[in-house]
Image (cartoon, rainbow, N blue to C red):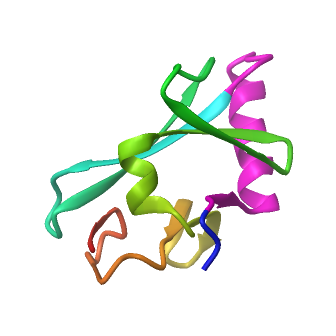
Amino acid sequence: MPLTISISEKAARKAKEFADRDSLESFGLRVGVKGGGCSGLTYTLSIDNEARPEDKVIEENGVKLFVDRKSYVFLAGTILEYGDDLNGKGFVFNNPNAKTTCGCGTSFSV
């Protein structure tokens, strides 16, 4: 399993669309986890202008990912994708570390 976090081409394209819509010239996606949700941990995702000093910065498909060190432990190997099928539209975390996931797709445990 790779010890990095990836973003698919489709997810990167969608992130750029959202940034363009909000007239952001320089941005990155802040990905992380926090305690909560029905399985114990919940994914977080937001647009941020710049990395924080303690962030790990990963750039792929023209998009920067900002990940705090604590979240990185839970997300290493994850691929951030964008789904727009019958199950709904939105960013999807494909996390090989998740032992159980919730039906909502945003909560997991390791």
Specify whether residue 60 is in view.
yes
- Taking depth in this image into account, of 101 and 20 the one nearest to the observer is 101
3 in relation to 33, above or below = below
- Taking depth in this image into account, of 12 and 95 the one nearest to the observer is 95
Measured as percent of width and height from the top left, residue 1 is found at 60, 80
Residue that extends furthest to the right in the rendered view of this protein? 62
- Tag count: 0
Specify whether residue 44 is in view.
no
Q: Where are the magenta residues, as a range?
A: 4-27
Q: Residue at x 80, y 16 (%)?
A: 25
- Taking depth in this image into account, of 4 and 89 the one nearest to the observer is 4
In the rendered structure, the answer to whether residue 97 lies left or right of residue 110 reads: right
Q: Residue at x 71, y 56 (%)?
A: 11
Q: Residue at x 41, y 76 (%)?
A: 97
Quarter holding residue 39: bottom left
64 in relation to 19, above or below = below
In the rendered structure, the answer to whether residue 38 lies left or right of residue 19 reads: left
Measured as percent of width and height from the top left, residue 6 is found at 68, 60
In the rendered structure, the answer to whether residue 99 lies left or right of residue 87 reads: left
Quarter holding residue 4: bottom right
